[in-house]
Amino acid sequence: MKNHILHLLLFFLLVDIGASAQQYKKDAEKQFLHYSNLVIKKDFRSASDFIIEDLFSIVPKEQMITAMEKVFNLPGFDFFIDSPQVLQVGDSRKVDSALFLKLKYSNILRMKFDTSTDATQPDSSQAESELLTMTLQSKFGEENVTYNKETGYYSIYSVKDVIAKSTDLKDWKFIVMEEDKMPFLKKLVPKEFLE
């Protein structure tokens, strides 16, 4: 009987350890979605609190916030993000004194470009739309880009990797992995996460 109780206690202990070991993944996912929603709401100052702080030694925080505001408010360009979804959360790994993990997420980018045309060039708007469609399809994949002729909006299904960093498995900071950020990423992220 004592053996059965001991086995039962051991079983519950292992289940509890397994559940708490996975809690950090739920925390990282929840915090990343909160960060994404701040970006969607264009609350870049609050969103910057969720960016890996080491980035600010390369690009000052205020400069980063200003750059984000400019991208989302370019004249002749209407741009917004919706439907963020975390697709996968990897296991954490300790590198030096920090913990890292990789997330994969998706969202939908909606964008509209002001393609005001010259009245003497009636076919230029159509040609510009076709060229822009091909450019976006080459970057995001043909199946991930649609164009609505009635509204003039492009919808782009985007899947990206994100690196998350923490010191305690509870509070996470993020950086989205993009080709144009690779010089920064190489300075901020362990190389095994860049592959």
Image: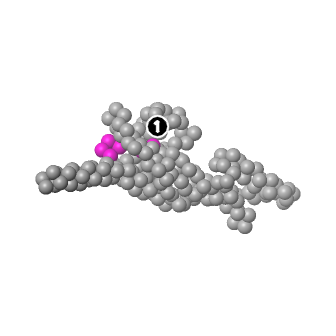
Query: Horizontal and vertical percent for residue 24?
Result: 34, 50
Q: Residue furthest bottom?
A: 150
Residue lying at 55% horizontally and 56% vertically, measured from the top left: 107
Classify mark 1: helix, strand or loop. helix
Q: Of 59 and 98, which appears nearest the observer? A: 98
Residue drawn at (72%, 67%), measured in percent from left and top? 150
Q: Position of residue 35 (x, y in %)?
A: 44, 54
| x 52%, y 50%: residue | 68
Whether residue 184 is visible: no
| Residue placed furthest toward the left | 2
Quarter-of-image position of residue 99: top left
Residue beneath the point at 51% across and 57% down: 84
Q: Which segment did they paint magenta? A: 163-169
- Does 80 appear above or below 104? below
Which is nearer the eye, 118 or 107? 107
Q: Circle 1 sits on which residue? A: 193
Q: Is 167 covered by the magenta stretch?
A: yes
Residue 19: x and y in percent read: 31, 53
Decide if residue 119 is on the left or right side of residue 177.
Answer: right
Q: Which residue is most to the right?
A: 120
Residue 104 lies in the magenta-colored region: no
- The answer to whether residue 194 is seen in the rendering is yes
Q: Residue 12: where, in percent of width, then height?
A: 23, 54
Question: Residue pushed farthest front?
Answer: 1
Front one among 148 and 94: 94
* Picture layout, residue 148 above or below residue 6: below
Circle 1 Cα neighbour tier, 10 Å, few/some/many (<14 / 14–19 / ≥20):
some
**Tag 1: residue type?**
Phe
Residue 83 placement, left or right of 153: left
Dividing the image into 4 quarters, which one contains the N terminus?
A: bottom left
